[in-house]
């Protein structure tokens, strides 16, 4: 075979050297040259002991596998080619059909070798008939007919042999192969071996990156034409990655409207600055190519692949870069993780802009950091996911029912608690429910450990995410002060603490070192379990369903603070509607503020909101005097998992927050269905565990 | 979206804002209560004047974070990004070339901070810089930070200089220019 590696070479060379040395040893003994023989023995002792190690070492040296040799593309004169096509195929044969046949020949050299080895002349074999059959399937019946003349087609109608068109086409393909000089015999009629696969590099198109709009789209310009803006010597030449193919020296052209002076590029438009306005860059959602580096452009197939890999494979930018370079890149490609990150950002902006119906624009000459920040501000919409706003499906909305179809347990204590259920029934009937459908949204949080400024009550972004602990404001405020709380001494250079607090700093560094994180820190402990080798710190664990404790103030600001959780609002079908970061706790006030932000007007509110601490949120709303406003549209219920604990102790939760009362008090939460035997049974109308299920499916838990 | 109950912009307080700013930028400056004499003019400024603007810029960032937290930003006005606030004080090139490279690192040198703030208890030019110049600019400050707090570089021995020359010969063209 054609594939060889360093290791194979090494084994062969070592074997060869050893053989020569053994020969010299024998020769030395034979001619009684003891000096020569001893030298050879010494060499053998040293090198034979290194053989295995050397081979093993060479195995681990990264190498690029030598690609299989490929033959050149047929270089026959076009006239000969044209004459053969016109002389052997039908007169109505189209260019795509000719190209299909040509490429079928050049891409199946192994099959042609097998065919010609079996029969030297143009007779048909089952090999070439298989190729003819594949071409027929590719072209379809109408396309296949154009391969034959009228006379041939009439003969096929009266022929008695099976598949006469396949046999005829197979013969033509054999002749065509010989005409193209894809033929494994030399002039002496001697078989020259299996044909090499044919390289198509000489057929690569000459690509240019141009604006994708042919006319100026500015109002008042009357669709005027665009003029090539750059002078010949100023036209940049860039590298273009199109899918997995890499094209070098691609000309990058831009067009300018002579009326409004707007410059059109392949991925954006630039409007000039005027009095009172700045030059702006409008991102084109329909762009075919995206600029990801100073001299590097990619097509949307590449950028989409980056986006999908980062989400679906959890690939990092540098990981994706290494994958692409190792698999597809050639010597001339300079690809860095920054290019991959730029492709991710640019593609994300385009996809979200299309879905949101927004044309994203930013000041001209913005860095990728500015683009990211601005895109989040404009497209992020404070965590509300606009495409999900109008989402509705059978899973997340149910037809409204005034009363339950089936009451299995009229005295359900879990539903009514110690009192009667009349209050809830009255409450349900007073609810201003859309008579068409009842909707529910589910809230829950997940701890992700996103970092923010360590200063008290500051949640700004860090100025340095690799070792920093403050935002730019507090970094400036602290300056060279010791990062221990209330200490005003000067830090010792290359540390974050003063001379008095070096012990604290060293302990912090030790606890956060790579060795510590790779060792005992990875051991799974139960909550509040303190093993002998764990640090003797009495941590306060935040209770899940109880009021949040006042967070303990940290002794120092050596490391950044982390957000407590990311809260999501999901539809019961799994569509994420909105998200927010809660800095310190999943408190009732935070939840209410989040709900007010996502549902500012009562018309937008769902009929049911399911939260694991709904009873606490309900109490908070009542205490805030907001219940009258919320009660018109919405009820708060606990999810089915947490309700198991709540119902034992909390009478309010039993009365108002039961997710599935079987006494008929909430006909829109419990619906009836029929089992396989045709019997009626009750089931929950909505999935209240959807947030956890979504996060598990996305591999976040 | 949330209907903000933020302040209603009545009349811009920044009447004397220079022409370099757009109307939207002036409104942002008004909401962030930035003094008009601190806004971008395009005129050349001393290091101290630049630093004073940098302090106001940091205050504005903090103010914006507080306003965002309280959801009181005026709905009719675009929420500014960090770069939008920067552009109220200085051009983008000057930000990347000088401010962002020097001022964040100056805080580790309290004497220089006092000098930049023109405090009464500041040290003299010679004590701070090591060299007296009529005017100090960003290139001086960059060099000063690079040298660990001085403009004066100790002269190396002749032998060392010769060695350096030899090593520069083999270096890149960029290193050679230095």
Image (spheres, coloured by chain):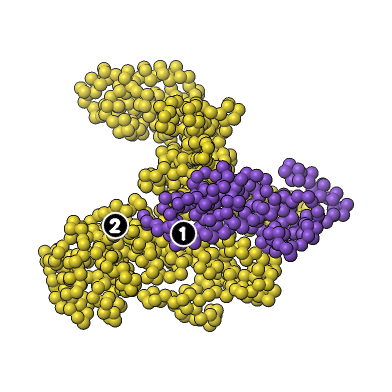
Against A87, residue B166 (above or below) is: below
Chain letter for mark 2, please: A
Chain letter for mark 1, please: B
Colour used to depict chain A in the structure image? yellow
Q: Residue at x 23, y 75 (%)?
A: A655
Is label 1 in a helix, a strand or a loop?
A: helix
In the figure, is residue A93 to the left or right of A7? left
- Crowd band around label 2 with a 10 angstrom C-alpha radius: few (<14), some (14–19), many (20+): few
Residue bearing mark 1? B68
In the figure, is residue B138 to the left or right of A286? right
Colour used to depict chain B in the structure image? purple
Residue bearing mark 2? A604
Residue A329 at x, y = what percent? 53, 43
Against A655, residue B85 (above or below) is: above
Does label 1 lie on the same chain as label 2? no
* Quadrant of image for the C terminus of chain A: bottom left
> Nearest the camera: A400 or A336?
A400
> Nearest the camera: A560 or A68?
A560
Q: Quadrant of residue A616?
A: bottom left
Is label 2 in a helix, a strand or a loop?
A: helix
């Amino acid at each position: 075979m054609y594939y060889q590696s360093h290791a194979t070479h090494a084994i062969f060379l070592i074997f060869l050297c050893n053989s020569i040395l053994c020969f010299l040893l024998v020769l030395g003994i034979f001619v009684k040259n003891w000096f020569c023989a001893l030298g050879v023995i010494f060499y053998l002792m040293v090198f034979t002991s290194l053989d295995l190690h050397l081979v093993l070492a060479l195995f681990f040296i990264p190498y690029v596998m030598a690609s299989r040799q490929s033959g050149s593309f047929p270089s026959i004169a076009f006239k000969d080619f044209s004459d053969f096509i016109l002389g052997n195929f039908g007169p109505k044969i189209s260019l795509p059909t000719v190209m299909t046949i040509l490429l079928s020949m050049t891409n199946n050299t192994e099959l042609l070798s097998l065919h010609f080895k079996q029969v030297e002349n143009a007779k048909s074999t089952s090999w070439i008939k298989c190729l003819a059959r594949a071409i027929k399937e590719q072209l379809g019946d109408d396309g296949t007919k154009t391969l034959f003349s009228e006379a041939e087609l009439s003969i096929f109608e009266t022929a008695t042999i099976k598949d006469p068109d396949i046999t005829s086409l197979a013969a033509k393909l054999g002749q065509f192969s010989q005409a193209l000089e894809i033929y494994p015999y030399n002039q002496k009629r001697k078989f020259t071996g299996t044909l090499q696969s044919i390289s198509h590099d000489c057929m690569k198109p000459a690509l240019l990156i141009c604006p994708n709009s042919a006319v100026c789209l500015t109002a008042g310009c009357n669709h005027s034409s665009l003029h090539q803006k750059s002078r010949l010597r100023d036209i940049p030449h860039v590298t273009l990655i199109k899918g997995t193919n890499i094209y070098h020296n691609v000309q990058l052209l831009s067009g300018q409207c002579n009326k409004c002076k707007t410059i059109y590029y392949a991925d954006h438009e630039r409007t000039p600055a005027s009095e009172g306005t700045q030059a702006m860059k409008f991102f084109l959602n329909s762009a075919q190519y995206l600029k990801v580096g100073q001299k590097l452009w990619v097509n949307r197939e590449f950028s989409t692949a980056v986006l999908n890999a980062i989400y679906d494979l959890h690939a990092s930018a540098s990981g994706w870069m290494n994958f692409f370079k190792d698999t597809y890149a050639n010597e001339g490609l300079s690809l860095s993780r920054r290019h991959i990150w730029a492709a991710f950002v640019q593609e994300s902006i385009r996809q979200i802009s299309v879905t949101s119906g927004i044309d994203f624009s930013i000041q001209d000459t913005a860095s990728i950091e500015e683009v990211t920040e601005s895109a989040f501000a404009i497209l992020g919409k404070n965590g509300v996911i606009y495409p999900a706003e109008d989402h509705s499906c059978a899973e997340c909305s149910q037809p409204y029912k005034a009363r339950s179809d089936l009451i299995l347990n009229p005295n359900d204590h879990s539903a009514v608690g110690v009192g009667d259920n009349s209050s809830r029934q009255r409450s349900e009937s007073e609810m201003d429910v859309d008579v068409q459908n009842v909707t529910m949204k589910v809230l829950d949080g997940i701890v992700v450990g996103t970092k923010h400024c360590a200063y008290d009550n500051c949640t700004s972004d860090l100025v340095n995410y690799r070792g920093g602990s403050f935002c730019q404001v507090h970094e400036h405020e602290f300056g060279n002060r010791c990062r221990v709380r209330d200490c005003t001494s000067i830090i010792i250079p290359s540390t974050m603490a003063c001379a008095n607090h070096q012990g604290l700093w060293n302990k912090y560094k030790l606890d956060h070192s790579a060795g510590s994180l790779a060792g005992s820190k990875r051991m799974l402990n139960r909550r509040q379990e303190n093993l002998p080798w764990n640090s003797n710190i009495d941590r306060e664990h935040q209770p899940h369903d109880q009021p949040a404790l006042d967070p303990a103030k940290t002794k120092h600001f050596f490391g950044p603070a982390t957000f407590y959780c990311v809260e999501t609002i999901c539809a019961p079908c799994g569509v994420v509607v909105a998200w927010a970061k809660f800095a310190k706790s999943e408190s009732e006030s935070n939840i209410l503020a989040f709900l007010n932000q996502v549902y500012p007007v009562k018309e937008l509110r769902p009929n049911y909101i399911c939260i694991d601490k709904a009873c606490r949120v309900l109490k908070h709303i009542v205490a805030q005097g907001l219940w009258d406003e919320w009660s018109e549209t919405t009820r708060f219920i606990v999810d089915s998992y947490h309700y198991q604990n709540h119902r034992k102790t909390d009478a309010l939760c039993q009365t108002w927050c039961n997710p599935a009362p079987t006494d008929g008090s909430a006909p829109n939460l419990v619906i009836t269905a029929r089992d396989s035997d045709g019997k009626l049974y009750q089931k929950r109308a909505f999935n209240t565990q959807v947030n956890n299920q979504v996060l598990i499916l996305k591999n976040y838990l | 979206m949330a209907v903000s109950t933020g302040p209603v912009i009545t009349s811009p307080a920044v009447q004397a804002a220079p022409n370099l700013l757009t109307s939207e930028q002036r409104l942002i400056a008004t909401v962030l209560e930035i003094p008009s004499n601190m806004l971008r003019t395009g005129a050349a400024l001393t290091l101290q004047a630049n630093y004073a603007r940098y302090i106001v810029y940091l205050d504005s960032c903090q103010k914006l974070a507080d306003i965002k937290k309280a959801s009181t930003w005026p709905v009719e006005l675009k929420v500014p990004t960090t770069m939008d606030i920067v552009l109220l004080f200085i051009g983008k090139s000057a930000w990347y070339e000088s401010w962002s490279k020097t001022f964040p690192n100056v805080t580790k040198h309290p004497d220089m901070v006092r000098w930049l703030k023109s405090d009464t208890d500041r040290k003299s030019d010679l004590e701070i810089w090591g060299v007296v110049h009529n005017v100090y600019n960003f290139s001086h400050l960059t060099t000063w930070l690079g040298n660990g707090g001085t403009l004066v570089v100790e002269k190396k021995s002749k032998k060392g200089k010769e060695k350096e020359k030899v090593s520069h010969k083999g270096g890149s063209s960029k290193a050679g220019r230095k």
